[in-house]
Image (cartoon, rainbow, N blue to C red):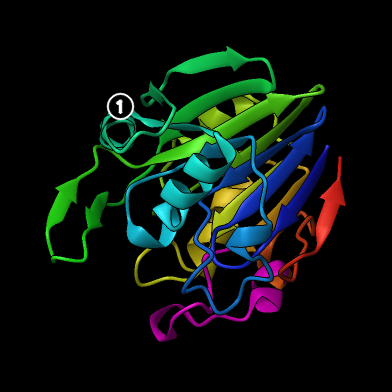
Amino acid sequence: MKISYHGHSVVQIQTNGKTILIDPFINGNQLTDLKVEELRPDVIILSHGHNDHVGDTLELAKKNNALVIANHEISTYLGWQGVHTHGMHIGGAHQFEFGKVKLTQAFHGSSFTTENKELIYCGMPAGILFMNEGKTVYHAGDTGLFSDMKLIGERHPIDVAFLPIGDNFTMGPEDAAYAAKLLKAKTVVPIHFNTFPPIKQDPFKFIEMLEDQNGKVLHPGEAIEI
């Protein structure tokens, strides 16, 4: 399984010939190395409905006939736009041909803002567990610290955890380091930082905070294999 990071909260997983994109915020993301016209995702998974996470989902899904996995509210809305979706909700899991997906809780908001400045309710935010090839990847989405991260790690031993560190809208580095302690993932990768001024952080300082010295900073386009 090859896992790459592409700025903000964009994560790509390649497994068994399938390409899975998580939170594909490409256009407007000055930190990404990706271009929408060059992407060919088979699957898109969304953690929540904010514009900087839904990103280019609609265009990517329609152009590539990609399956979009998200909570029921987001899936319903995108389905109305002609997208092939699979709705889920927190605590639920589903075995797909390309792997198993389970949504966990996350403490954040979830709404989509249209060009007409309309705010569309997008249900509860979520974290994402992706399991395939005997490995587990955890994308925490946008969240604050919560104690049940310990249960997530115990129930689903995690190989790689992507944790937000930007502060202001999500956990900051200190809380994210404590989250890593609770999760006990083999490798911890920081996400959701430096895209906008309020979430400016030094990811290397975050890595130094980790008790288990199990952190890795991935620059946009860099990958790890598990």
Q: Quadrant of the N terminus?
A: top right
Residue 199 percent location from the top left of the image: 45, 77
**16 part of magenta stretch:** no
- Residue denoted by label 1: 72
Residue 24 screen position, x and y as percent: 53, 54
* Residue in view at x 35 percent, y 66 percent: 169
* Residue that appears at 84% across and 52% down: 224
- Residue at 64% from the left image edge and 42% from the top image edge: 41
Left or right: residue 19 compared with residue 84: right
User: Which span is picked out in magenta?
Assistant: 191-207
Q: Is residue 205 magenta?
A: yes
| Image quarter of residue 203 | bottom right
Residue 107 x %, y %: 33, 47
Q: Secondary structure at mark 1?
A: helix
Observer-nearest of 204 and 68: 68
Q: Is residue 186 visible?
A: yes
